[in-house]
Amino acid sequence: MGQEAYDDLVEVIHDPAIIHVMIEDYRAGLTVDRQHDLEDRNAGRRVQCPTLCLWSSKVDTEELYGDPLQVWRPWLSRVAGHSIESGHHVAEEAPTELANSLLHFLS
């Protein structure tokens, strides 16, 4: 994490409203979002637009979940992607590779 992003986090992390929103995001992901996803999947609904999936190579994503593209294939009609040599903060740690991947996907 870059210093500017860290400073921004430190500034807002003490705001109870910000903490509430962060917790609500996690809560939704574990409850209503999962229910909606299950309903969509059971109805055979999938994202139809081309989707780019990028992930950090230096975190445990693949160890925890396996190949991210395989994880997303049941949900997405058209998915492409690859890992990027970075830690958690891809945009700050590998901005050129990220930008090149986005430009290639969008062209």
Image (tube, rainbow, N blue to C red):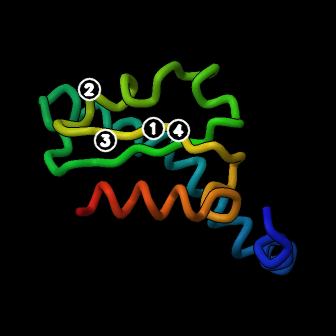
Which of discs 4 and 2 lies nearer the camera? The answer is 4
> With respect to residue 39, does 23 lie above or below?
below
- Determine the image quadrant of residue 91: bottom right
- The residue identified by callout 4 is 83
Q: What amino acid is labelled 3 in the image?
A: His
Q: What amino acid is labelled 4 in the image?
A: Ser
Which of discs 2 and 3 lies nearer the camera? The answer is 2
Element type where label 3 sits in the image = helix
Instruction: Tell me whether the residue at label 4 lies in contact with that at label 1, contact meaning CB atoms closer than 8 angstroms.
Output: yes
Pointer 3 or 4: first along the chain: 3
Visible residue check, residue 23: no
Residue displayed at 60% across by 49% down: 26
Whole-angstrom CA distance, mark 4 to mark 2, is 19 Å
- The residue identified by callout 3 is 36
Residue displayed at 70% across by 35% down: 59
Visible residue check, residue 84: yes
- The residue identified by callout 2 is 74
